[in-house]
Every structure is written in structure tokens, then in C-alpha cells.
């Protein structure tokens, strides 16, 4: 079984962390995915903790979906290292990392929706 981790930076503002958890909850209630949130810092669980939660639920492979817009230092350096550490800590479980959100066709539509909302309130 494949599980998913939505990986965000994390914030000192707990409502920002909760917003990520809410997105993950909506993914989970679709009934199609076993999914957990994880945070680089300032939020819980971290990647290792989310990996352990999924393994406890019977997951044999993990796909990490970065909740990041672009490819930056955290995506290039930190996330691969954390994924490798989590894999080794759990018997070399397979952990794959997807691309960030940049380039996804729905991103342009989301921006257009925000622009339309702004015009509607002007």
C-alpha cells in the first residue's frame, strides 16, 4: 500500500500549520489516499514522525508531496536528506518525492480565481 505525506515548511503561527492539516484531512476523506501532514520545522509531526504513522497503518511505500511552490534549498537539500534518513530508520522503506507545485496547471487557475475574487470585492 502507498501512503502520502504532504510536506510543508511549518510556521510559528499555528493556524498556518492547521491549514496544511486541513488540506491533508480533505485528501484523506476522499477515501482514496492514506495521507499524513509533515513539517520541516515549527510544526508536528516532522517527516520521520509522519513516516512512522504511515508505516503503523500498513504503508509499504511513501510518496512525499511538497507543499512548496518552487524548487529551493529546502527542496533540493533538506527534504532529500530527511527522506533518506526516514527511509533508513524504517528498514529502507521506499520514499519518493514529487515536484513542488510550480508548473501544475491548477496553480494558474487558483491565481485567476484569487484575481476574480479581488475584482468582485473592489
Image (cartoon, rainbow, N blue to C red):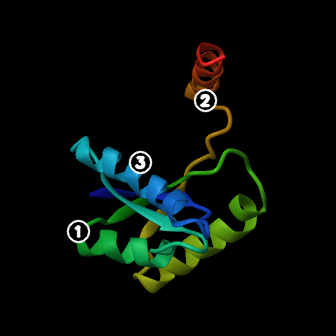
Q: Residues within 10 Å of mark 1 (few under 14, many from 20)?
A: few
User: Which residue is tagged 1?
Assistant: 58
Q: Residue at x 36, y 77 (%)?
A: 52
Question: Looking at the image, do the residues carrying marks 1 and 3 touch, with CB atoms under 8 Å apart?
Answer: no
Instruction: Using the image, determine if residue 43 lies above or below residue 29.
Output: below
Secondary element under disc 1, as helix, strand or loop, is loop
Mark sitting on residue 107:
2
Using residue 13 as the reference point, say whether residue 49 is left or right of it: left
Residue 102, x across and y down, in percent? 67, 38
Q: Is residue 87 visible?
A: no
User: Which residue is tagged 3?
Assistant: 23
Secondary element under disc 2, as helix, strand or loop, is helix
| Label 1 vs 3, first from the N-terminus | 3
Residue 114, x across and y down, in percent? 61, 25
Q: Residue at x 64, y 26 (%)?
A: 111
Using residue 9 as the reference point, say whether residue 18 is left or right of it: left
Q: Residues within 10 Å of mark 2 (few under 14, many from 20)?
A: few
Amino acid at each position: 500500500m502507498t501512503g502520502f505525506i504532504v510536506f510543508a515548511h511549518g510556521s510559528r503561527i499555528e493556524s498556518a500549520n492547521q491549514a496544511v492539516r486541513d488540506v491533508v484531512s480533505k485528501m484523506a476523506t476522499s477515501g482514496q489516499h492514506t495521507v499524513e501532514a509533515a513539517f520541516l520545522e515549527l510544526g508536528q509531526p516532522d517527516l520521520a514522525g509522519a513516516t512512522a504513522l504511515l508505516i503503523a497503518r500498513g504503508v509499504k511505500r511513501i510518496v512525499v508531496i511538497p507543499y512548496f511552490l518552487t524548487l529551493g534549498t529546502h527542496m533540493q537539500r533538506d527534504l532529500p536528506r530527511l527522506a533518506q534518513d526516514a527511509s533508513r530508520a524504517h528498514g529502507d522503506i521506499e520514499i519518493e518525492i514529487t515536484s513542488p507545485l510550480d508548473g501544475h496547471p491548477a496553480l494558474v487557475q487558483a491565481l485567476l480565481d484569487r484575481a476574480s475574487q479581488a475584482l468582485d470585492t473592489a
